[in-house]
Image: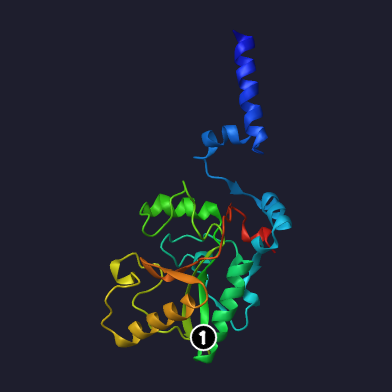
Amino acid sequence: MRIIIKFIYSKFVLLFLSFGISINFLFAQKKSDKLIVLDKLAYEQTIQRDPNRELINLETIPDIVLSIKYATPNNFTGQVIYGQARAYARKPLANALKKAQMEFLKLGYTIQIFDAYRPYRATVLFYEIIKDTRYVASPKTGSKHNKGCAIDLTLVDKNTKQELKMPTDYDAFQKAAWANAPVSDPEAKKNRQTLIQVLSQFGFRVNQSEWWHFDFLECPNYEVLDIPFEELE
């Protein structure tokens, strides 16, 4: 009986190999429900194969302004989440954001970043606090931020660096912060519209429940990362 079973299994494996499929495929379905999160070493191996996967320091974009809320206790958690006030994103997003920044500068504005790449451990903490996937990602899937493919931002006056009026503050978990929510203040409405329209020209799509959150659409199969900013310097 064992000989027959071994024979059948061998034929099954050979059948898969004849179509160029790895034996690992036989067991992939059992593991597919487990999220794969890369550390620094695994991340570095991916960028050796594909340089576009590199995380770029967004401070290299001319005149960019950082206001990294999670590097201070001035955020919805009341805790300091990041050890450093940094903003990173995958190379294609960084290149597109630079082009958008040039357009905003022509209009008299500059981009102010609240958050970009977000280590996976931060998403786990956020979910423990909020548990509302309209505003924070589930740890089961990770987020576009964890992949370096999303950015939270607003606009400031390029000369005074004062924030433009928007419908709500950053991380306001309420319907007034939705991207299509009615806005009674014409100035805030105009500023939100300008932000969304310009960024959409460069491959960004606004998150419908957060006017400040934009996903970059050209991030094919990028991995969830859990690398502290200190390891990216």
The vertical placement of 8 against 43, above or below, is above
Give the residue type that dot 1 points to: Phe
Estimate the x, y position of residue 216 in percent, counting from the top left: 51, 67
Residue at the top extreme, as displayed? 1
- Quarter of the rendering occupied by the C terminus: bottom right
Q: Which residue is drawn at 52% across and 80% down?
A: 111
Q: In which quarter of the image is residue 135?
A: bottom left
Q: Which residue is drawn at 53% across and 51% down?
A: 121
Q: Is residue 189 left or right of residue 40?
A: left
Q: Is residue 160 left or right of residue 15?
A: left
Estimate the x, y position of residue 165 in percent, counting from the top left: 38, 83
The vertical placement of 92 against 46, above or below, is below
Q: From this viewpoint, is residue 124 visible?
A: yes
- Quarter of the rendering occupied by the N terminus: top right
**In this figure, which colouring scheme has been used for the structure?**
rainbow
Mark 1: secondary structure: helix
Q: Residue at x 41, y 63 (%)?
A: 76
Q: From this viewpoint, is residue 159 visible?
A: no
The vertical placement of 126 against 161, above or below, is above
Estimate the x, y position of residue 120 in percent, counting from the top left: 54, 53
Q: How many labels does the image show?
A: 1
Residue at the right extreme, as displayed? 48
Q: Mark 1 = which residue?
A: 104
Mark 1: few, some, or many residues within 10 Å (few <14, many ≥20)?
Answer: many
Estimate the x, y position of residue 200 in percent, counting from the top left: 46, 75
Q: In which quarter of the image is residue 53?
A: bottom right
| 18 or 114, nearer to the observer | 18
Q: Residue at x 65, y 68 (%)?
A: 56
